[in-house]
Amino acid sequence: MDPVRRALTEAELTAIIGRIDAADSTGDLLAAVISSVYDTLLADIGLTLKTLPDGHQLDPRQFQIPTSQWQAITGAVTDRAAAWGTGPELAMELISVLPSSYDDPAAPVPDTPRTDRRPDLLHLHVSRDAVDVIAAAARHVQALATHYGPASPEHLTASSSWLGGLSRLLSLGFGADTRVHHDGHLSLLVNTGSGFTFGLIFHGATRRCTAGDDCTATIADDGTAHALWSTAVLADHVHEPSFPLDAPRPGSWSFHS
């Protein structure tokens, strides 16, 4: 059966956003958005979530609302959740619990004011070992610039990913209390006030042979060549490393939850 396409009226959407703004916890917020959206859609057939027939489970795929209205609802949810640092996780949850969407440029979207609900202060706790990692990462990025050049892909890739990682540590999106710990020579483990934990991990480039002959050898820091898998081609030639043995290792930082 085709899903029901239904644009919300401006009054309906305003009421849904009002219930979202009135939520006083993450759990209450999720319950409010689910019940208000589906109660509005089910009202067309005289039902609510609480009055569904016994044994009937609602399938979000049965409904579609305009993309602009979907974005207005999810935006209001993440804005409200900023008070508790749970916006990112709720945003992922909403993808599976809200109706899907369709394009309708004419669908009404109220011009509601956005309220910054983030806490006034971010409490950032950085362990001594984590301070050493941050200093080591800064030195590594500078070493890449010195060896390969400030405009080189090696330096730009590393520096942009590192700066992006540091800015995320200063985000209030995951709560107002962030604790940063050592997780390896150039990597960090981050525990946030919302309970979300992630790593800022350095991924060093693999030094490979570039001498040709279909050689797929990897080259260790001591210059020895190795095959990564049993069928890998290890050509009988002088192996040429993709970056020098004595050079700082290119790479980038990325987040892992």
Image (cartoon, helix red, strand yellow):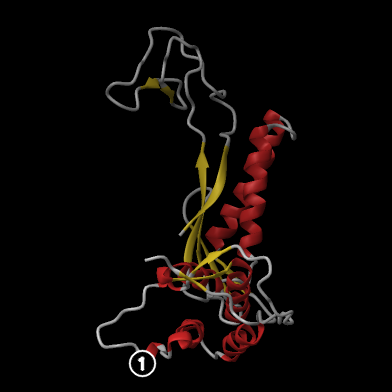
Name the residue rendered at 62%, 48% in the picture: 161
| Image location of residue 97, percent across then percent down | 43, 73
Q: How many marks?
A: 1
- Quadrant occupied by the N terminus: bottom left
Query: Would you identify the image quadrant in which residue 54 lies?
Result: bottom left
Residue 164's place in the image compared with 119, above or below, is above
Taking 224 as reference, is 54 left or right? left
Give the side of residue 54 with respect to residue 89, left or right. left
Foreground residue, 17 or 130? 17
Viewed as shown, does residue 234 lie left or right of 128?
A: left
- Please report the residue visible at 64 percent of the width from the left and 58 percent of the height from the top: 166
Q: Callout 1: helix, strand or loop?
A: helix
Q: Quadrant of the C terminus?
A: bottom left
The percent position of residue 151, horizontal first and vertical second, equals 74, 33
Which residue corresponds to mark 1? 51
Question: Which residue occupies the foreground of this view, 238 or 64?
Answer: 64
CA neighbours of label 1 inside 10 A, class few (<14), some (14 to 19), many (20+): few
User: Does residue 256 lie above or below 86 as drawn?
Assistant: above
Q: Residue at x 47, y 69 (%)?
A: 196
Residue 165 point in image, percent of width and height: 61, 55
Please provide percent x and percent y for residue 250. Answer: 58, 35
Front-lying residue, 113 or 108? 108
Amino acid type shown at disc 1:
Thr
